[in-house]
Image: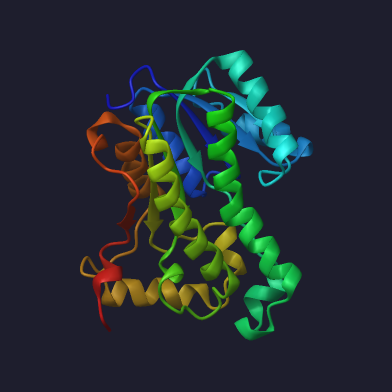
Amino acid sequence: MLLEGKKILIMGIRNKWSIAFGIAKSAYENGAKLIFTYMGEDNKEKIEELVSEFEGSKCYVLDGASEDDLVREVFEKIKKENGKIDGIVHAIAHANTEDLRNDFIFTSKDGFSHACDVSAYSFVLVSRMAKELDMLNENASLVTLTYHGSTKVLDGYNVMGIAKAALEASVRYLAENLGKEGMRVNAVSAGPIKTLSAKGIKDFNSILTVVEEKSPLHRNVTTTEVGNVATFLLSEMSSSVTGQVIYADSGYNIMGV
């Protein structure tokens, strides 16, 4: 098993349809011990039931992944109760609904800042806090989630595309910084999947149809498939891979039309 004996922190799990859950399932089946963070104390019972199939897992509420003090407090608790960890999966992103429904040009300053803060800066903060608190084992791997809208204009993705572009640039700079200590940083660019977050994107079903028609494999991807790519990046099998955006999208990104 690729992650036997490794402790992996998965941040941002919401429900069984989420990419984070697909990653958790793959990591667990490959031997990982899982730690989760989620939003909202009132979601505790729901999240604990959700991850109950992952024996020995632990859950921590984190209501502000882009808030320095909150991340530090939760990470200190995680380290105290679990020791050092071997990997972090950052599955956190958000944009205001009105900034996804209107043309991008109408994005407000607050909306722009919010999307970039939650979706990109939070990964920088998480990486920094983990390093400062010395909670990462040697050869640790950090993985975040991005999307094709970071490099191409996709109707309805709007400010989230800008946030994901910032996230991907952050991956490269973080890879250089943490590479000095033997740690790796990568992103998985998943194809469109019917998640709760995807519901905020206008005409999302049409995107699924286009991928089926145009991608080399002529099908959409599953959370399980994306999870397997993340497991690879978390494992020693990818020990020479860092600073990369790995596409798990049935090859759609290579197509010109």
In this rendering, position of residue 137 left or right of residue 214 = right
Residue 103 seen anywhere in this rendered image of the structure: no
In this rendering, position of residue 150 left or right of residue 51 = left
Q: Looking at the picture, tell me which residue is in the foreground, 254 or 138.
A: 138
User: In the rendered view, would you say 37 is above or below 171?
Assistant: above
Residue at 34%, 30% in the rendered image: 182
Residue at 47%, 78% in the rendered image: 154
Residue 56 seen anywhere in this rendered image of the structure: yes
In the picture as drawn, the residue positioned furthest to the right comes out as: 42
Q: Looking at the picture, tell me which residue is in the foreground, 39 or 246.
A: 246
In this rendering, position of residue 178 left or right of residue 104 = left
Q: Looking at the picture, tell me which residue is in the foreground, 67 or 219.
A: 67
Q: Quadrant of the N terminus?
A: top left
Residue at 51%, 49% in the rendered image: 17
Residue at 73%, 36% in the rendered image: 70
User: In the rendered view, would you say 87 is above or below 210?
Assistant: above
What is the quadrant of residue 177 in the picture?
Answer: top left
Q: How many marks overall?
A: 0
In this rendering, position of residue 181 left or right of residue 159 = left
What is the quadrant of residue 178 in the picture?
Answer: top left
Q: Where does residue 216 sit, x and y in percent of width and height?
A: 21, 69
Q: Where does residue 211 sit, x and y in percent of width and height?
A: 34, 72
